Amino acid sequence: DTGVSQDPRHKITKRGQNVTFRCDPISEHNRLYWYRQTLGQGPEFLTYFQNEAQLEKSRLLSDRFSAERPKGSFSTLEIQRTEQGDSAMYLCASSAGHNYGYTFGSGTRLTVV
Amino acid sequence: GIQVEQSPPDLILQEGANSTLRCNFSDSVNNLQWFHQNPWGQLINLFYIPSGTKQNGRLSATTVATERYSLLYISSSQTTDSGVYFCAVRKGNSGYSTLTFGKGTMLLVSP
C-alpha cells in the first residue's frame, strides 16, 4: 500500500477557471476527508465521505465547490470559477473509522493568479 | 465548535535538547491525534491518543482526557524534527465526524 495519493501536486490557474483535484485513499479505508490549509494555519475541514456517501460538508464549502467519491474509491474535488481566495493547500485524508488515525496525502497546492 | 489551543506557538532548540508541546481542548474528545508537518507540507500521523500514554522512539505523548489536555514529548531532538506539530481532536458524542486542528507549534531544531 502506497498510502494516500493526490494529484496534481501543484496547480496554477487563472481566476475564473475550473480546477479538479483527485485523491486515492488507502484501499481498506472507507472514510475519506478533504481539508484546506492556508499559510500559518492548521488544516480546516471541507467535507467527508463514508464509502460513496458525502455525509458532511463544512460551511467553507461554497456552492462553487463540489466533491464526489464514485463507487467509494477515489474522490475528486472540483472548484468552479476559481477566486484568488481559493489559493491554498488542499489535503485529502483517509481512515478506517472515526476513532482511528488519519493518513494524509501530500496535498495539492493551488495558486490562483 | 470545539476549541483547540497549542503552545508554544514557536520553539527553537539546539540539536539534542528535549521539548514538551501542549494541546488544550475545550470539550470531551473521543479522538485526538498528533501530526508532524514537514517543510514540504506532508502531514505525518505521530500518535492516535484519545487517552493514556504512548511512546514511539524519541517521541511520546500523554493525553489526560479528564483535564482536557495532551502533551507531546520530543527527546534528543534532531534537525529532521523541524516542522509544525499539530494537535487535532474530535468532540466526543457528537454527530460531527471530523477532526478540528489547532494552529500548531512551529519547531526549529538547529545543528
Image (cartoon, coloured by chain):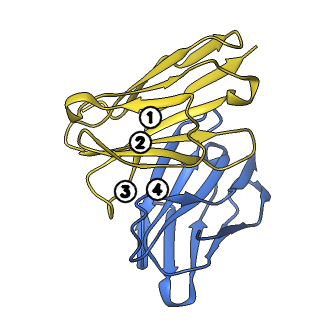
Can residue A107 be seen here? The reply is: no
Q: Are marks 3 and 2 in contact (CB under 8 Å)?
A: no
Residue where numbered disc 2 is placed: A93
Gap between marks 1 and 2 measured at Cα: 6 Å
Do callouts 3 and 2 point to residues on the same chain? yes
Give the chain letter at badge 4: B
Q: CA distance from mark 3 to mark 2?
A: 10 Å
Residue A105: numbered disc? 1
Residue A73, numbered label: none
In the rendered structure, which amino acid carries the disc numbered 2? Answer: Ala
Q: Looking at numbered disc 1 in the image, what kind of residue is underneath it?
A: Gly
Kindly check if marks 1 and 2 are in contact, taking CB atoms under 8 A apart as contact.
yes
- Give the class, few, some or many, for how many residues have Cα within 10 Å of label 2's Cα (few <14, many ≥20): many
Quarter of the figure that contains the C terminus of chain A: top right
Amino acid beneath label 3: Gly
Circles 1 and 4 on the same chain: no
Specify the subunit that label 1 lies on. A
Q: Position of residue B56 (x, y in %)?
A: 42, 62
Residue at (38, 77) in percent of width and height: B93
Hue of chain B? blue
For discs 1 and 4, the disc positioned in front in the rendered view: 1
State the residue at coordinates (65%, 36%): B39
Q: Which chain is yellow?
A: A
Quadrant of the image occupied by residue B67: bottom right
Q: Which residue is mark 4?
A: B46
